[in-house]
Amino acid sequence: MDKNFNQLKRQEKEAFFMLPIITEIKRLGGQTTTKELKKSIVANCKDIPEDVFTSSKVSRNGNLYLENMYPFNFSVTSLVMAGYMDRPHPGQLVLTKKGRQFNGSAQELVDDVHKLSSPIWAERSKKNKQRKERQQQLEKENDDNEEWRTKLLMALENLTPAKFELFCRALVKKMNVDIDENIGVKLSGDGGLDGFGYMTTDDFRTTRVAIQAKKWNSDHLVSSPEVDKFRGAMDKYQAEYGIFITTSSYTRDAIQSSRIGTRVITLVDGTRLTDLIAKYELYVTPVVTYELGEFFTDDN
C-alpha cells in the first residue's frame, strides 16, 4: 500500500477493507460474526492500524464517532451485494462459494465488487434521494449500534481510576467470581493488581483469578510490557487465571503476549467491555424498540 491507511480517503478505505474481510473470514472457517471479524482483522492485518476500530473523531455537531466503522460496514454490505458473502442473521457473515473460491488480487476483488454492487447502490440512492437516507439504511443493516457503545466508553473514561477499578471488580463479580475483600482493592501497594477473586466450577475446583484494569482512551493501546507486568503480579499471588480489562484496545504484541505460557490471560477491550456491561446490565438499563418491516418502507 503506497499510502498509510489513515491517509486514505473514505472510499479508498472501503476498497482496502475488502480483501482483509474475505481473508479473515476464510481464516475463521468461512463464517463468523462482525465482532469476531473485526478482532481478527486487527490481530492479523499488518497494513491496518491496531486502533482502526477504536479511533474516534468529533463530528460537526460535537458528537464523538468511530471514524472507520462506516467504510468497514460499507465494504461488508458491498461484498454481500456482489455475492461474496451472505448475512443470514444480523451480525453474522458466511462466505458463499464465490467468496470461498476467490484467490485473486485486492484490485480484482474491488473491481468485481464495484461492478456488481454499484448498480444496487445507485438504485437505493434513487429511492432514498439523499445520501443521508442511504447512510441510515446502511446503519440499519449493521448489527452494532455504535452510538451507545461510544457514549458508554466516554462515560467509563470519565470515571476516576479508583471508581473504574471498582466497576471492573463489580463486572467480574457478575461473572461468578467471588471478589477478595483485601487483595487488589487499594490504589497502590497491591503488587500491580486491581482485583482478585475465586471462581468455583461445577466440580468444586476453585481457581484464583487476578484482575487488571486500565482506563485509557482509544489512542493509548495496551502494549505487551503491560501484559507481562500483569503476569508478574499474577505470579505473586499464584493466580491461575488473569482478566485484563481496558476501555481502549491492545497492540498485536500484547495479544501474542497474553497467549504465551501455561496461563492464558483473557483480554477485554472496549468493544467487548460494552458487550459484557450490556449482557450483565451493570449500571445500564436496556431500552426496547422496534424497527419497521419492509412492508412499511417499500413503495410497491
Image (cartoon, rainbow, N blue to C red):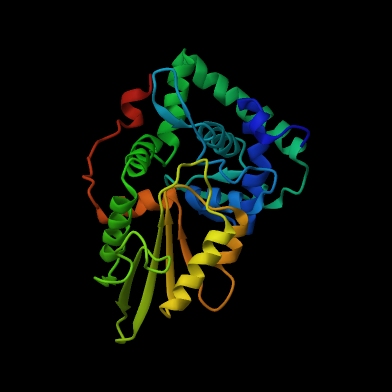
Pick the front one: 296 or 264: 264
Tell me which corner region of the image, top left, top right, bottom left or bottom right, holds residue 106. Answer: top right
How many numbered callouts? 0
Q: Residue furthest top?
A: 129
The quarter in which the N terminus is drawn is top right
The image quarter containing residue 207 is bottom left
Q: Position of residue 192 (x, y in %)?
A: 43, 65
- The spot of residue 117 in percent (x, y) is 61, 29
Q: Residue furthest front?
A: 189
Q: Position of residue 284 (x, y in %)?
A: 23, 46
Please tell me whether residue 285 is drawn above or below residue 224 in the rendered image. Answer: above
Compared to residue 81, the image places residue 231 above or below, namely below
Percent across and percent down for residue 175 are 30, 65
**Residue 28: in sight, yes or no?**
no
Residue at image point 59% right, 49% down: 42
Q: Residue at x 47, y 22 (%)?
A: 134
- In the shown orientation, is residue 130 left or right of residue 168? right
Closer to the camera, 265 or 204? 265
Which image quarter is the C terminus in?
top left
Whether residue 139 is visible, yes or no, is yes
Residue 285 quadrant: top left
Most foreground residue, 62 or 127: 62
- Picture residue at 46% right of the left edge, 65% below the top: 266
Q: Answer left or right for 253 relative to 173.
A: right
